[in-house]
Each structure stands twice: as C-alpha cells, then as structure tokens.
Image (spheres, rainbow, N blue to C red):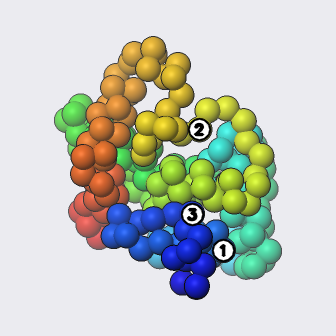
C-alpha cells in the first residue's frame, strides 16, 4: 500500500481495500508466487510446458511463467514438447467455480479432483485469481491479447454474442455470474470450499 492507493486506485476489493497500478501488479505477482508455492506446483528440475496462445488468460499465464522462470531458474517450454513434466493451464476462479457447480449439478462428485489446483502433471498457477483481476493485470502491463474478454465477474466484460449461444455450460456460468453480483466473493468461496474438502 502506498500514498497513491487512495488517490489513484485501479482496483477495489470487496472489503473496500484499494490498490493503485503499481500495488496491484505487486499484489498479483505475489499471489501468483504464493499459489505456485502453496500448492507445490514447481520444483527444481521441472520443465513446465504451456500452450502458447493469444487469448487473455493464455497471455497472462505466459507472462507470469516467464517471470517465474527467470526468478527460479525452472525451465519453461511451449507445448507440445515431450520434455515437459508439468503442464500449466490457465484456469481461474471463474472457470473453476463454474466447473464445480456443473459437477455438483451433474451429481458426479467423484470428479472434483479435476477442479483442484494441481492434478497429476497439470498445474493451475492462476487458480486464485478472478478473471477481472487477470484482465486488469493484462491491461496495466500492456499485454496484447485477442478474442473476447472473460464474461465472468461483471456484465461489462460480457461479449454480447455470448448470450445468443445457449448451452448448458453458458447457463451455469450465467447463473454463477448473477450469483456473484448478489453475493460478492461467492466464486472465491466455492473454490475455497473445495480446497477445504481436500485439505
Ligand atoms: Zn499503491
């Protein structure tokens, strides 16, 4: 927190804490490193593969992995690459909470493992971020990305065409988005409940 946080905020948490650009980037990077450490996502000698793409979350994941590789010396490669023993994917709180609700609705709780921060070779370094945080990070860092911004979080990010595409997954996402509007932090709470379950 700095003097600018109150006067020039770019982000406000549900608890009203505000962050300026610099402090937001700092918060974001720290949280990323915390996620990797807390869930044992990477060790010396690992080779982390990731899909190179130009969508928002792919671009942010790449930016963070490059930073992490420089800092830790752990190698990263683009997929497909047979040397990779870990595979980083770009799931966030928004995508995970939607998947968890979908799994609940289908009544197939045995497949919850797929929604954990790591599963076998798969690691999810963006696991504790909301899509709106990922978008803000990309904007502040001037990262170039293509395609729609994530719909989740608030309707201002919603691509108008999304609404025309009616399928079950979109309905569930819409439901979770609406729920989040009425009950801020509910997406985070869903993911945290799952983590509690598997502690
Ligand atoms: Zn600040």
Give the alpha-carbon distance from disc 3 to disc 2, as whole Å: 18 Å
Which quadrant of the structure image shows residue 95? top left
- Some atom of ligand 1 lies within 8 Å of the CB belonging to the residue at label 2: no
- Does label 1 point to a residue whose CB lies under 8 Å from ligand 1? yes
Mark 3 → mark 1, Cα distance in angstroms:
9 Å
Quarter of the image where the N terminus is located? bottom right
Q: Taking 79 as reference, is 4 above or below it? A: below
**SS for dot 2:** loop
Quarter of the figure that contains the C terminus: bottom left
Residue 22 is tagged as: 1
Q: Which mark is residue 149?
A: 2
- Identity of the residue drawn at 60% across and 51% down: 135
x, y percent for residue 85? 66, 59
The mark nearer the N terminus, 2 or 1, is 1
Residue located beneath label 3 in the image: 10
Regarding residue 100, the answer to whether it shows in the image is no
């Amino acid at each position: 927190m700095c003097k600018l946080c109150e006067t020039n905020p770019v982000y406000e948490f549900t608890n009203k804490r505000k962050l300026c650009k610099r402090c937001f980037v700092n918060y974001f990077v720290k949280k990323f490193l915390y996620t990797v450490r807390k869930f044992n996502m990477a060790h010396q000698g690992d080779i982390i593969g990731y899909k190179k793409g130009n969508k928002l979350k792919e671009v942010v994941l790449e930016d963070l992995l490059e930073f992490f590789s420089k800092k830790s010396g752990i190698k990263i490669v683009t997929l497909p690459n047979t040397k990779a023993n870990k595979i980083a994917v770009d799931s966030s709180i928004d995508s995970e909470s939607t998947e968890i609700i979908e799994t609940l609705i289908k009544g197939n709780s045995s497949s919850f493992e797929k929604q954990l921060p790591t599963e076998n070779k798969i690691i999810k370094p963006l696991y504790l971020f909301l899509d709106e945080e990922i978008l803000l990070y990309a904007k502040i860092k001037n990262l170039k990305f293509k395609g729609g911004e994530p719909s989740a979080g608030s309707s201002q990010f919603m691509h108008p065409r999304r609404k025309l595409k009616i399928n079950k997954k979109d309905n569930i996402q819409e439901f979770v988005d609406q729920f989040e509007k009425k009950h801020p932090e509910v997406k985070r709470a869903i993911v945290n409940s799952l983590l509690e379950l598997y502690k």
